[in-house]
Amino acid sequence: MNGLFDRIPLLKKYLADPNLTAAQRAAIEGELGEISHLLDRAEQILGELAGSVR
Amino acid sequence: MSMNVRQNAIALLTTPNKHSPLAVHNAIIDLRRNPKAGDEHMLRKYLDYPDDMVVSAVLYALIHIYEFAPDLKELLLRFADGDGRDNGEMPIQTQAIEGLALYSREDASALSKLLEVASKNETAEAPRARAWKCIAELFGVPWQREYSDAMIWDPESEKSISIRREVHAAVEARDGKPITA
């Protein structure tokens, strides 16, 4: 989990590389999409937990 | 504790060659969330595993979940210098740095290694930023979220240099003695 906080700025940095190939860019964007999905899912679970203790 | 999850994890970890690194990593997480004394002996075998996320997950377990092992600090000192299996955010080195920070209030050699890794220009940006974050916390410097982003984006930027100066000044001001928790 710790690594996620560093992974996001690293991916942003990789995306800024002008020599990035289209395939590399797609891979990085895919990974960012996956992280975004994970965070959405975590937020959803937190919402459910908050609802269940009310 | 879920005995079922635990048993499945143990079954997988006793036949690692049949599974992907991701499956092994997930089994380690399952095991450490359902721990029993003695599991660490099984997990330690995975310190030699070729995948960085697997090794990092084992280190986390040894640091935070199981009883202190006398050789743990030596392991962390070694991994804090970097490991050839590491990629990207360097999870092995970063985990070792986090682990060393836990010892650094009482152990001068752990603190010294943290300062050494943080000071080296050759240290990869993510573990280097993490080392500075740990040092900042040990010496009472509030670590803003954007500090890590700045140091990862460009460790030699004005912003990164000024962050290091700020933390370094706090270390000097306390004569190298961390704040006691």
Image: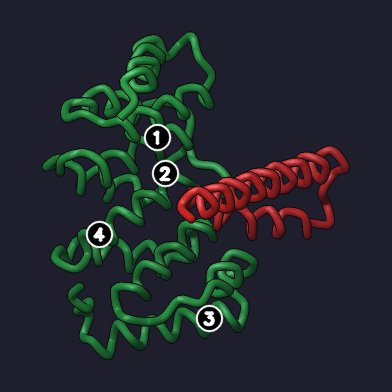
Chain colours: A red, B green
Q: Which of disc 4 and disc 2 is earlier in sequence?
A: 2
Quadrant in the rendering for residue B68: top left
Chain containing mark 1: B
Q: Is residue A22 left or right of residue B121?
A: right
Q: Which residue is tagged 3?
A: B161
The amino acid on which the numbered mark 1 sits, given as a three-letter code, is: Val
Chain containing mark 3: B
Residue B30, image x, y percentages: 39, 29
Chain containing mark 2: B
Q: Which of disc 1 and disc 2 is earlier in sequence?
A: 1
Front tag of 3 and 4: 4
Q: Residues within 10 Å of mark 3 (few under 14, many from 20)?
A: some
Q: Residues within 10 Å of mark 4 (few under 14, many from 20)?
A: some
Q: Residues at badges 3 and 2 in contact (C-beta under 8 Å)?
A: no
Q: Which of disc 4 and disc 3 is earlier in sequence?
A: 4
Give the number of the disc on residue B126: none
Up-down relation of residue B151 to residue B89 (above or below): below
Query: Marks 2 and 1, how far apart in space?
Result: 6 Å
Give the number of the disc on residue B102: 4
Q: Which of disc 2 and disc 3 is earlier in sequence?
A: 2
Up-down relation of residue B158 to residue B123 (above or below): below
The amino acid on which the numbered mark 2 sits, given as a three-letter code, is: Ile
Q: Which residue is tagged 2?
A: B92
Q: Is residue A43 left or right of residue B38?
A: right
Quadrant in the rendering for residue B14: top left
Query: Marks 3 and 2, how far apart in space?
Result: 25 Å
Label 2 secondary element: helix
The amino acid on which the numbered mark 4 sits, given as a three-letter code, is: Leu
Label 1 secondary element: helix
Front tag of 3 and 2: 2
Q: Which residue is tagged 1?
A: B55
